Image (tube, coloured by chain):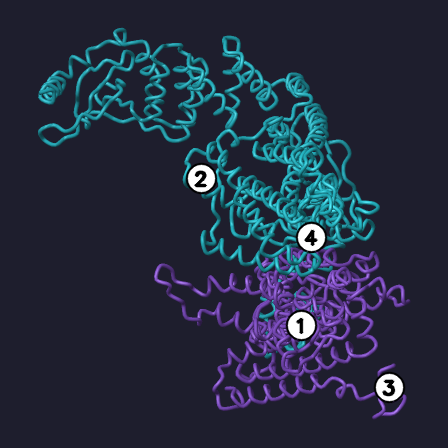
C-alpha cells in the first residue's frame, strides 16, 4: 500500500491502474494483436495465402506453448518452485478435450455407417460401435469409467480445468504441507510426471495406452477446411495467451506478487512474517496448473494427436529450459523463450536447416541440434542467468533494486551467496 | 567295374528265381522266420492290426530285432515281390536300361546278398501311426543300450510323450541299470508313469504319496489331469456324492450366466439364446410395408421394442421361439450346476488332491523365496545405479541430472571394448577399469567447467546438468545410432543358479548383487578409513573451516565428483550386461536413482542401501499382485514414494544436527 499513498498524482487511497503500472503488459498485448492480425492477413484461410496452413498450426501451437511458459514463469520465476510437472498438466488438459473430440467424431462416423441399416440402431449398439472403434487398438470394446462424460462437451471442458487443477491441488497440498522445497520438490514433481506417463502408457489405462488419442484436428460436425479451422484455433490460442498473460501479470503485480517473490527469495522470512507460505504456494501451483491444462486443450487439437510420450518428464524440463533461456521473473521473457526455442527447434529438427560440410564431417542439424541446445542451455545458465529478456534491461537500463544490483537468478541459494559475500 | 559285377549279379538273380523260391523256412534266419510268420499283417500295414507283429519282434530278444525295427521305421526295409522275403536295401544306381537298382542286405547279418531291379521289390511304407508304435517298441532297446546318452535320450522321449506300454518296459529294465543317475531318473519316471497308467489304485496312491514334498513341474503335470473336473447340470438340487467337486452358482466368477445357459442349451434343456444379431436378422427378414409385426421400423431403436416385435412374430408363427436375455435368469434358476471329477477312482482323486494341496503350499513358499531373490537383485541394481549419486548428490549436494548419462557412457565403454577385445571375460576385465577412467574424467571435466560455478545455486545446477544430459544423450545417438547395442556377458555368467523348479536366479544378477556389496564396502572404506574420505567429509560440512585446515576444497570437490561419476560408469557396465545398451539407458534410471537417495535419506550410504532395498522389494511385490503389468507397478511405486516422503521428508535415515543443514 505504501506505493499508492506516496504517489501524489493519483491522490491518497487511489492506485494507478494496473496496466499503467505495467506498461510491458500493454506492449505485449499490442504485439500479440498485431501478430494475430498480421497472420490472419497472410493466412490461406482468410488472407492472401502467404503462410501455409501447416505453418499456421505451428504458430498456433507455439502460442499455446507460450501460454504454458507464462504459467511456468509464474510458478518458477516468481515463486521459486521449479516444477517439473507442468507439462503433465498440459497433457491432461489435452487428454480431456481429446476424449470429447474423439468420442464425438467417432459417434458421427458410427451413426453415419449405421444409418443405412435396415433397423434403426439402439443406443447400446451405437455406444458399443463407438467403443469398438476407439478401443479396438488396445483390445477392448467397452468404455472405461473415465469416459463417462466424454459425450458432453461442457463436462469435458470442465474437466480441462478440473482434472489438472485437482491433481495439482492434491499433489501440491501433500508436498507443501510436508515442506518439501527446492530440488527435492523438483524431483518429486518429476516423479509425479513419470508416474503419470507410465500409467498412461498402459493399455488398460483407459486412454488407449501407447496409441494415445488421434484425429483430434478434425472438429466433429464442422465441415470447414483445415485452413479455416487452423485459423480459429490460432485466434483462440492468441486470445488465451493474451488473457492468461493479463491474468498472470495482474497476479504477480500486486501485494500477492510481492509475497510470492518473497517466498522465492527467502521462504522462512515470509513465514516468520506471518504469511501462510503453503497457501500461497498451493494457490500458485494450482492456478498455473489450470492455465497449463487450458493451454494443452488448445494445443493438442492443433497437433492432432496426443500420446503419453508427450508428457514424459523430459517435456517439463524443456519447459524450464525455454523459460530459463527467455528469462525468468519476467513474463514476456517466458513468451520470448518459448516462442524462440520452439520455433528454432522446429526449424532445425524439421530438416529444413542446411547441413554444414566441414570437409571431414558433415554436420546434420537434425542430429546436432539437441547438442547445440543442451550446450546453449549450459552457457545461458552459467553466463546469462537473465536470459534473452535480460537484453531488454540493456535498453531500458533497468536495475534490480530488490537485489542490490546483484542479479543471480531466482534461486534459493542466490540470496545466501550474496549475504555471505557482504 | 563293380557296377559291371553288380549288373552281372542282378542278371543271375533274375535268371534263377527258382533257387530262391526253393529255400525252405527252416533255412531262414530266426528274424526272417518271425517276419514271415506275421507276413500278412505286415503287408497290410494297418495301424489297427500291426500290433502283434511289432510286439513279437520286440519281445523276440533277437539281436537283429532293434535293427529291423529301426530300418523298417526309416522305410529302408523292402519285401521281395516273388517270395515275400524281407531285406534291407540301399539304392545302387541304374542299370544299362535306365532301371533303378537296389542292393539287398540280409536282415539278420547285414551282409550284402546282391543287387536287384527296384521293380522287383516292394517298399514297406509304415504310416506315422505305425512308426510311433515302432518307436515305442524301440524304447526298450534304447533303454538297455550300453551308451548312457542313448538311455538318457530315451528317458527324455518318454517324459515328453509317455504311453502306457512304457511303464512295463521301464519296470523290466530298471533293475539292470547300473548308472546311478540314470537309475534315479528311471525310478522317478517309473513312479510318475505308475500314477498315470498304474492299473491298481493302491499302487497309484502309493506312488502319489511317495512324492510328498516334491516340486517338480513333471509331477504337477501328472497330477493335474487326475483332478480335472467336468461341468454338469441337474434339474433342481445338485446330487450328493458322485465325486462332486463343487457346486457353482451361475453369475459367479467361476461360471458366468452366459456359460451356464450355453450348457443348458447344449444339454437341450433350454431353447437356444437368440443373439442380438440373429434377432435383428429375423426382424429384418420380416419387414412388411415398413412394419415388423405391426410395429413401425423407425420405432425399433430400443432393445425392448425389438423383443416385443420378436415376441409378436413368434406368436404369429413367423419365427421360432427363442429365449431373450431377460428370460435367461428365470431358466437358469431352475437348475443346479456342479463339477464332477472325471477320474474314475475317488481314492486316487483324493490322494492327488492332497498331494497337489501340499505342493501348492510348498510352491507358494518357494515362489515367495524366488520373489525375494528377484527383489534383492532389483534392489542391488537400483543401489548400483544410485551409489554414484549417493556421492555427488548425497555427500556434495550437487544435483547431477547427467548421472544417468554417465551410466550410459560406462555401458558404451563396455560395448566398445568388446568390439576390440573379442574374449568376453578379458573384455569385461578391461572394460570395468576403463569405464571408471572414462567417466571419472568426464565427471572431473564437468565439475571443473560447470558445476563449481553453481555450488550455491542447486536449481541452476539441476538445469545446467540437464543441458549436459541431453547433449550427451544426443551425442551417443549420433555415434552409436539409435538401435540397442548388445553387451555380451562371458559364458561363466551365462546360466542361472537353480535351487529347485521354482527358485532360480541368473548368475548375472548374482554378480550384480556381489558388485553392489563390493561398492558398498569400497564406499565405506574410502569415506571412513582414508585421508581423502576425511577431507571429503570435512569439505562438505564446512568448506571454509576445511580450507583453513589446509585442505584444498576445490581439489576435493573435483575428486569426489569424479569418484561418484566413475562409480556410475562401472555400474553402467554391470547394467549393460543384462539390459540392452541404448542412448536412453541412463535416463531410465535417473528418477529411480534420485528416489532411492531421497527415500533413503540424503548424505548417508546406509540410507541409500535401505532406500534401494525398499524400492526394489516394493516394486517386485507390487508386480506380484499384478504380474502382467510392470508399468503399473512402477506407477504405484512412485505414488507410494510421493506419499512416503510426506511422512519422512528427510528419508529413512535422516541426518541430524549440523550435518543436516550443510
Chain identifier for the cyan-coloured part of the image: B
From the viewer's perspective, is residue B598 above or below residue B57? Answer: below
Residue at x 41% of width, y 24% of height: B49
State whether discs 4 and 2 lie on one chain: yes
Q: In which chain is the residue bearing label 3?
A: A
Task: Answer whether labels 2 and 1 touch (C-beta < 8 Å).
Answer: no
Between circles 2 and 1, the one closer to the viewer is 2
Q: Label 4 belongs to which residue?
A: B635
Q: Label 3 belongs to which residue?
A: A6
State whether discs 3 and 2 lie on one chain: no
x then y, percent, for residue A347 = 49, 72
x then y, percent, for residue B84 = 26, 19
C-alpha span from label 4 to label 2:
36 Å
C-alpha span from label 3 to label 1:
36 Å
Task: Answer whether labels 3 and 4 touch (C-beta < 8 Å).
Answer: no
- Find chain A in the image and tell me its colour: purple
Quarter of the image for the N terminus of chain B: give it.
Answer: top left
Q: Which mark is residue B418?
A: 2
Nearer to the camera, B486 or B326: B486
Sequence-first tag of 3 and 1: 3
Where on the picture, by quarter, is residue A405? bottom right
Amino acid at each position: 500500500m505504501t506505493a499508492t499513498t506516496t504517489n501524489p498524482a493519483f491522490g491518497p487511497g487511489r492506485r494507478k491502474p494496473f496496466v499503467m503500472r505495467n506498461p510491458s503488459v500493454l506492449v505485449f498485448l499490442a504485439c500479440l494483436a498485431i501478430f494475430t492480425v498480421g497472420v490472419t492477413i497472410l493466412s490461406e484461410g482468410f488472407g492472401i495465402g502467404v503462410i501455409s496452413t501447416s505453418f499456421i498450426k505451428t504458430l498456433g501451437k507455439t502460442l499455446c506453448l507460450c501460454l504454458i511458459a507464462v504459467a511456468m514463469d509464474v510458478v518458477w520465476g516468481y515463486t521459486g518452485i521449479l516444477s517439473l510437472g507442468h507439462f503433465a498438466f498440459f497433457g491432461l488438459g489435452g487428454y480431456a478435450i481429446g476424449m470429447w473430440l474423439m468420442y464425438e467424431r467417432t459417434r458421427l462416423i458410427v451413426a453415419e455407417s449405421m444409418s443405412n441399416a435396415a433397423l434403426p440402431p439402439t443406443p447400446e449398439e451405437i455406444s458399443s460401435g463407438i467403443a469398438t472403434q476407439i478401443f479396438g487398438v488396445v483390445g477392448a470394446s467397452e468404455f472405461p469409467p473415465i469416459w463417462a462424460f466424454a459425450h458432453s462437451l461442457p463436462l469435458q471442458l470442465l474437466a480441462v480445468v478440473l482434472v489438472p487443477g485437482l491433481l495439482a491441488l492434491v499433489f501440491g497440498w501433500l508436498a507443501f504441507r510436508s515442506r518439501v522445497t527446492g530440488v527435492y520438490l523438483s524431483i518429486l514433481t518429476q516423479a509425479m510426471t513419470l508416474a503419470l506417463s507410465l500409467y498412461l502408457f498402459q493399455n488398460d489405462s483407459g486412454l488407449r495406452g501407447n496409441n494415445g488419442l488421434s484425429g483430434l484436428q478434425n472438429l466433429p460436425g464442422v465441415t470447414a477446411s483445415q485452413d479455416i479451422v487452423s485459423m480459429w484455433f490460432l485466434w483462440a490460442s492468441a486470445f488465451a495467451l493474451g488473457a492468461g498473460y493479463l491474468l498472470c501479470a495482474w497476479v504477480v503485480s500486486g501485494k500477492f506478487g510481492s509475497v510470492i517473490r518473497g517466498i522465492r527469495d527467502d521462504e522462512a522470512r515470509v513465514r516468520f512474517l506471518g504469511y501462510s507460505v503453503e497457501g500461497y504456494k498451493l494457490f500458485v501451483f494450482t492456478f498455473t496448473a489450470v492455465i497449463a491444462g487450458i493451454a494443452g486443450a488448445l494445443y493438442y487439437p492443433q497437433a492432432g494427436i496426443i500420446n503419453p510420450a508427450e508428457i514424459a518428464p523430459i517435456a517439463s524440463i524443456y519447459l524450464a529450459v525455454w523459460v530459463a533461456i527467455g528469462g525468468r521473473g519476467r513474463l514476456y521473457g517466458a513468451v520470448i523463450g518459448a516462442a524462440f526455442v520452439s520455433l528454432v527447434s522446429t526449424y532445425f529438427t524439421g530438416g529444413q536447416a542446411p547441413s554444414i560440410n566441414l570437409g571431414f564431417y558433415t554436420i546434420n542439424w537434425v542430429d546436432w541440434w539437441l547438442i547445440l541446445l543442451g550446450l546453449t542451455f549450459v552457457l545461458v545458465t552459467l553466463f546469462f542467468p537473465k536470459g534473452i529478456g535480460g537484453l531488454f534491461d540493456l535498453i531500458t537500463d533497468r536495475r534490480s533494486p530488490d537485489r542490490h544490483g546483484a542479479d543471480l537468478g531466482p534461486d534459493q541459494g542466490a540470496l545466501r551467496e550474496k549475504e555471505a559475500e557482504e | 567295374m563293380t557296377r559291371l559285377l553288380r549288373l552281372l549279379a542282378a542278371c543271375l538273380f533274375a535268371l534263377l528265381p527258382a533257387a530262391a523260391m526253393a529255400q525252405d523256412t527252416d533255412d531262414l534266419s530266426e528274424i526272417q522266420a518271425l517276419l514271415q510268420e506275421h507276413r500278412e499283417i505286415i503287408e497290410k500295414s494297418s495301424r489297427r492290426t500291426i500290433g502283434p507283429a511289432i510286439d513279437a519282434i520286440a519281445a523276440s530278444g533277437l539281436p537283429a530285432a532293434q535293427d529291423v525295427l529301426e530300418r523298417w521305421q526309416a522305410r529302408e526295409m523292402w519285401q521281395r515281390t516273388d517270395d515275400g522275403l524281407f531285406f534291407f536295401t540301399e539304392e545302387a544306381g541304374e542299370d544299362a536300361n535306365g532301371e533303378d537298382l537296389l542292393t539287398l542286405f540280409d536282415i539278420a547279418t547285414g551282409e550284402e546278398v546282391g543287387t536287384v531291379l527296384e521293380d522287383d521289390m516292394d517298399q514297406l511304407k509304415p504310416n506315422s501311426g505305425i512308426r510311433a508304435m515302432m518307436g515305442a517298441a524301440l524304447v526298450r532297446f534304447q533303454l538297455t543300450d550300453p551308451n548312457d546318452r542313448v538311455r538318457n535320450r530315451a528317458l527324455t522321449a518318454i517324459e515328453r510323450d509317455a504311453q502306457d506300454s512304457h511303464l512295463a518296459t521301464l519296470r523290466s529294465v530298471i533293475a539292470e541299470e547300473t548308472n546311478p543317475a540314470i537309475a534315479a531318473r528311471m525310478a522317478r519316471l517309473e513312479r510318475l508313469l505308475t500314477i498315470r497308467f498304474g492299473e491298481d489304485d493302491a499302487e497309484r496312491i502309493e506312488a502319489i504319496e511317495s512324492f510328498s514334498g516334491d516340486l517338480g513341474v513333471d509331477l504337477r503335470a501328472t497330477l493335474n489331469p487326475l483332478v480335472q473336473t467336468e461341468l454338469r447340470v441337474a434339474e433342481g438340487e445338485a446330487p450328493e456324492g458322485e465325486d462332486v467337486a463343487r457346486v457353482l452358482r451361475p453369475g459367479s466368477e467361476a461360471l458366468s450366466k452366459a456359460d451356464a445357459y450355453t450348457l443348458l442349451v447344449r444339454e437341450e434343456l433350454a431353447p437356444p439364446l437368440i443373439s442380438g444379431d440373429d434377432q435383428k436378422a429375423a426382424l429384418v427378414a420380416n419387414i412388411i410395408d415398413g412394419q415388423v409385426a405391426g410395429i413401425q421400423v423407425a420405432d425399433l431403436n430400443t432393445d425392448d421394442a425389438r423383443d416385443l416385435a420378436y415376441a409378436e412374430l413368434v406368436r404369429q408363427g413367423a419365427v421360432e421361439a427363442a429365449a431373450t436375455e431377460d428370460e435367461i435368469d428365470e431358466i437358469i434358476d431352475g437348475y443346479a450346476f456342479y463339477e464332477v471329477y472325471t477320474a474314475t477312482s475317488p481314492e486316487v482323486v483324493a490322494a492327488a488332491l492332497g498331494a497337489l494341496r501340499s505342493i501348492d503350499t510348498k510352491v507358494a513358499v518357494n515362489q515367495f523365496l524366488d520373489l525375494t531373490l528377484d527383489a534383492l537383485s532389483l534392489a542391488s541394481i537400483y543401489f548400483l545405479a544410485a551409489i554414484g549419486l549417493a556421492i555427488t548428490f548425497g555427500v556434495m549436494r550437487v544435483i547431477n541430472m547427467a548421472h544417468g548419462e554417465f551410466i550410459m557412457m560406462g555401458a558404451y565403454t563396455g560395448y566398445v571394448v568388446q568390439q576390440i577385445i573379442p574374449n568376453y571375460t578379458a573384455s569385461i576385465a578391461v572394460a570395468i577399469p576403463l569405464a571408471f577412467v572414462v567417466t571419472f574424467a568426464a565427471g572431473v571435466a564437468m565439475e571443473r567447467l560447470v558445476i563449481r560455478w553453481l555450488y550455491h545455486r542447486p536449481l541452476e545446477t539441476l538445469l545446467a546438468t540437464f543441458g549436459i544430459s541431453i547433449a550427451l544423450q544426443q551425442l551417443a545417438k549420433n555415434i552409436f545410432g539409435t538401435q540397442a547395442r548388445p553387451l555380451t556377458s562371458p559364458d561363466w555368467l551365462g546360466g542361472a543358479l537353480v535351487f529347485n523348479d521354482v527358485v532360480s536366479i541368473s548368475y548375472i544378477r548374482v554378480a550384480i548383487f556381489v558388485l553392489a556389496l563390493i561398492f558398498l564396502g569400497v564406499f565405506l572404506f574410502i569415506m571412513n578409513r582414508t585421508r581423502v574420505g576425511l577431507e571429503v567429509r570435512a569439505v562438505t560440512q564446512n568448506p571454509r573451516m576445511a580450507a583453513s585446515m589446509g585442505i584444498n576444497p576445490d581439489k576435493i570437490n573435483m575428486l569426489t565428483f569424479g569418484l561418484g561419476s566413475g562409480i556410475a560408469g562401472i555400474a553402467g557396465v554391470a547394467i549393460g550386461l543384462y539390459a540392452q545398451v541404448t542412448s536412453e539407458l541412463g535416463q531410465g534410471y535417473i528418477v529411480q536413482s534420485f528416489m532411492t537417495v531421497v527415500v533413503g535419506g540424503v548424505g548417508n550410504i546406509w540410507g541409500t542401501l535401505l532406500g534401494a532395498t525398499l524400492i526394489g522389494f516394493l516394486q517386485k511385490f507390487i508386480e506380484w499382485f499384478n504380474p502382467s503389468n510392470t508399468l503399473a507397478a512402477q506407477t504405484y511405486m512412485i505414488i507410494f514414494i510421493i506419499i512416503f516422503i510426506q511422512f519422512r521428508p528427510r528419508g529413512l535415515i535422516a541426518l541430524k544436527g549440523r550435518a543436516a543443514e550443510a
